[in-house]
Each structure stands twice: as structure tokens, then as C-alpha cells.
Image (spheres, grey):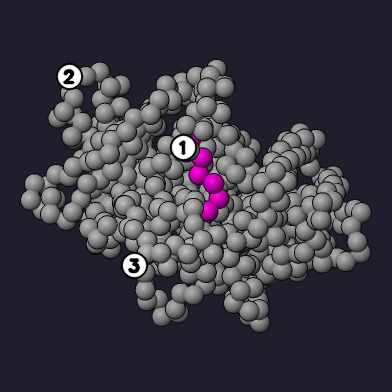
Amino acid sequence: MAMQSSPEVLNPGMKKLLREKGEADKEVDGHGHDCFDPVERIIKGFIHFKTSKFDKYPECFSELAKGQHPKFLVFACSDSRVSPSHVLDFQPGEAFMARNIANMVPAFNQLRYSCVGATIEYAVANLQVENVLVIGHSRCGGIKRLMSLPDDGSNYYDFIDDWVRIGLPAKAKVKREHPDLSFEQQTALCERESVNLSLVNLLTYPYVQRAVQDGTLALRGGYYDFVNGKFELWELKTDITPPILSSSIFSSCTSALLNPAFARLLHFQQLPSLQFQH
Amino acid sequence: MAILAPASVSKDPLPSSSSALTPLRSSTIFGPKFKFRQIGQTQLSLSTSFKKSSGFKLKGWRHSEGITQEFQVDKLETAAEVENECDFFDKMKHRFLSFKKQKFMENLEHYQNLADGQAPKFMVIACADSRVCPSNILGFQPGEAFIVRNVANMVPPCESGPSETNAALEFAVNSVKVENILVIGHSRCGGIHALMSMQDEEDPSFIRSWVLVGKNARLNTKAASSSLSFDHQCSHCEKESVNCSLLNLLTYPWIEEKVRAGALSLHGGYYNFVDCTFEKWTLDYDGSNLKESKEVAFRNRSFWS
């Protein structure tokens, strides 16, 4: 109900029914809905914050007003049940936070995804956060929609379907590796694989890659299971191996390069490429 | 999607079931080799995507039925890395377990109901700024508000095409069926500062591309308050941008239709964290005022301090 309306007079029969249900004290409007006042709800929330936090710690908030120096960039779903400020108790000033459908991070694309790109650019290049945490969660509507997308590429929802397609590689991986699981089980796996995909996509942003290689930025994934009250946490580690061939050896190994197995190893170690193996 | 690198098996006090332990996975991207390492999970069940290795590294914690156990740390890491990771890991563990004890378990029935489905009455669009989380400043509890956060709390118009923000709008309005959308701006917004200080000759960047969504707010601000200091102009633009976002919401036909029918209300808000005040106003729209005068009115303005 968007606008508060005056309760209509209830007939005696309706009043008796409500009393019997123990709802006699509740106000209802003519449609039988509770009278929810959104403005009152916002006022109460703000006053509680002001009196219990802001006014109690004026020095902290005064410092924060001068500038923010969060250590975290957090990606979380927009779902009303998974705010990281609740689940992980992030306080004002701690986490620069992006929230979108299914907590997705697309690969670098200045034309299509300037919104997420701006978030990452500001947090990593300007604020110089030290940690990126991408948090997935149980019963995610966005991941469910991803898993339900028709194979013909058609969109039922114009914007939702276009957005969740970012997660298609995660969906493909789950379906390929676990074809015999039920839809619900595959969806639960995809909720986690999508986080991994987002972590990998983060590395397509040059300032992220630079900071990770410099050791000043850590990339971590999380999964909040609100059905069972559990939390999983993991991280993405990077290693840069030393070269496996020097130029002098290279010139004498021409015949070895003709060996397909050797060429694959060289490609795997040195050439910048997106390559996944089972 | 990933290879599993063989590694030493950690000795730990876990039961003999190897399915409880999480192996190391590796995949190669852009030259460097990357590994996903599970550093914590809260029960003994294993994510099935990790199953395929004969060896594994595990560092983390497990919370199952009230018991928290520590695993042995991987010896190949440097001492500094271990210390930093332990600090992070311990911090997150402590925070989650506190939430679980003080909120989740104390309100178990409520959380169980929420697990079955969400029905928030609000959609909130707020800035990603670390100081303005709506869960903190407006006390939104789990289940109350579907929240989108981006740089400078902007809403692009419908004609700009699919994006992160309008995907969330479509989900919130058409699937979750929220009754209120609240766009909250705030003081000292870095995104608005970038918008107001933008020069034509600047190199392209994500921030520049994104904040241009608010170019009308910048134009309106320059027209209305060019005599003010730059800081005051930014403050003006922070609120003007909220209004532009509210108007952009009306460019979505399925939003405009619901607002006209009275099933959806659009509210603007402004949080000033310098002196801790909050302003709130509501869009007054009946479907006719935009077409006639290209302007909208606002009602129910409030200021709380």
C-alpha cells in the first residue's frame, strides 16, 4: 500500500472476526491491509541511528565526515535479507559497498557496464581499499533466473535477463560438471560458482590486477546461507611463476616445440590467455 | 573450469571423511596462475565443485552445532601472509558468529520465515559510500528493504538501455512488488563532486561515463546556483541529482503506471552526515503534470535533526 488511507468503519461482524483472530488492535484499511506508513518507518529508523550511534560517538563521525578510508569493497546482492552490515557487522566507514542483482561483477566493458566499473575504479584506484569481498547467498532470485534462462537466448525480462547473463559461464560450468543434480542443487552450486566468476572478472580491471600483483589488494569470496545460518569464506590467490624457458634454450628447442604437449605447457604458463582445465 | 593442483594434505582434527575437506583449485588466466582456496566454511559439507583433487590445502574455520575448530595453516605461506590472513579470517568469523548468536538465533522464527521468501515494502537506491549504508542510518532490518548501491545513487533513464540499476528496478517492482522506492543522496558525495568538476577534455573513465547519468542535475545546479561556492553547488547538486533520479524512474513504463495508480510511491531523501540530519520528500505525480508542464511537484517535505 503506497498511500496511507483512512480506515473505513468496520461492520460489527468484521470486528468480531478480527477480535477472534487476535487482531482487534490492528488498524486495517478498507482492503484489509495493515496501515504501513513508510515515512514513519524512515523517521523511526533515522532517529534510532542518531540517538544510539551518531550522538554517542561524535568524534568518530566527525572524522568520517572529513573523509572515508574503507578497507573493504564489498559486492553483495540487493536481496533484503543479506545486508553485509547485518551479517558481517560492517560499521559506517568500513566498507564501500555495491549491491546489485545476484552480486555480480561483469568483466571490464566501458560501454556496457560503467556502473560497476565506476564502483571498482573509485574503490580501488581512488580509495585504495585493501580487500574486495564478493558475497553470494542462498535462494538467490537472480541466480535462479540465470539457471532458468531459456537456451534460445530470448529474454522474458528485458533488464533482469540481460544482467544475469553475466553469470552464464558459471551456469555452464555447473551444468557440465553436475548434469545429474536437481535444478535446486545446481542453482545452489551456481550461487557459489558465480562468486568465483566475479572474482575472476575483477582481474580484468587493470587497477585491480595491478594492486593484486603488488600485493596491496586481496580478492575473497563469501557465501551466506540464511536457511541454515552459515557463512563460507574463501580467497583467490595468485602466483606468477618464473619463466620456464630462456631465449638461448628456446632456440635449441625448436624441435621440442613441435611436440603438441610441450606447446600446451608453454601456453599454459606464459602466454596471457583465458584457459580453464578440468 | 579449474585445474586442481596437487598439494600436501593438512593434518587436522576432522573426522576421517575426506569429503569434508576442501582441495586447492587452480586456473590460469592472463598468465599468472590463480588458486581458489577455501579458507572457511561453517559446516562439514563440501561444495561439490571442489571434489576432484587427490590432494588439498585447507585453511579456515568451521562452525557446526556450536563448535568452532581451527585448521592447520598451510606451511608454504610466508609468516606475514599467514598473520594477515588469520587476522582477516578471525575478524570475519567473529563478526558472523556474533550476528548468528545475537540476531539470527534470537529471532529464529523470523529468519526461518524470511528464508521462505522476502516481501520488502521498500526499494532503496543509495550511494556505495561507506558512510551511508541504509541498514545503519535508517535501521532497515533483514527483510525490510531491497537495496541497490552504486556511485552517487543514480538511476539511469529507461532509454539508456539495460544496466545493473534498472535490472534491480525491474526485479524489485515487477517481481518483489515493493510499494515504495526511496532514492537517498548524501553530503560530500565523491561521485557528485566528480560530476560537478568534470571538464570536457578529460580522459574517459568509468567514473566519468557513469556520473554523466546526472548531467541534467549538473545543468540545473549551474543554472540555479552559479553564484555559490563550489562546495555549495555540490550540495545543491546532491539533492538535484536525487530529483533527476526520481524523474528517471518515471521513464520506465511499468513504474509510471504503478505510481499513477497509487500502488507505488517515489521518495527522495538526503542524509547529511556532517551534522546528522535527514530530509525526506515524496514525488507528487498523477500522470498529468509531467506532460503539461514538464515539472513535477513534491509533497510531504520533512527535515529531521
Q: Are marks 2 and 3 on the same chain?
A: no
Percent across and percent down for residue A51 are 52, 27
Disc 1 sits on a residue from what chain? A
* Residue B208 figure quarter: top left
Q: Is residue A159 visible?
A: no
The answer for how far apart the CA atoms under marks 2 and 1 are is 37 Å
The local secondary structure at tag 2 comes to: loop
Question: Residue B227, which numbered label?
Answer: 2
- Residue holding disc 3: A158
The answer for how far apart the CA atoms under marks 2 and 3 are is 43 Å
Looking at the picture, tell me which residue is in the foreground, B114 or B64: B114
Instruction: Provide the major secondary structure of the magenta segment.
Output: loop
Three-letter code, disc 2 = Ser
N-term-proximal mark, 1 vs 3: 1
* Residue B15 figure quarter: bottom right
Q: Is residue A71 visible?
A: yes
Few, some or many residues within 10 Å of mark 3 (<14, 14–19, 20+)? some
Few, some or many residues within 10 Å of mark 1 (<14, 14–19, 20+)? few
Quadrant location of the N terminus of chain A in the rendered image: bottom left
Magenta span of residues: B137-143
Question: Residue A44, which numbered label?
Answer: 1
| Residue B141 drawn in magenta | yes
Q: Are marks 2 and 1 on the same chain?
A: no
* Residue B228 figure quarter: top left
Few, some or many residues within 10 Å of mark 2 (<14, 14–19, 20+)? few
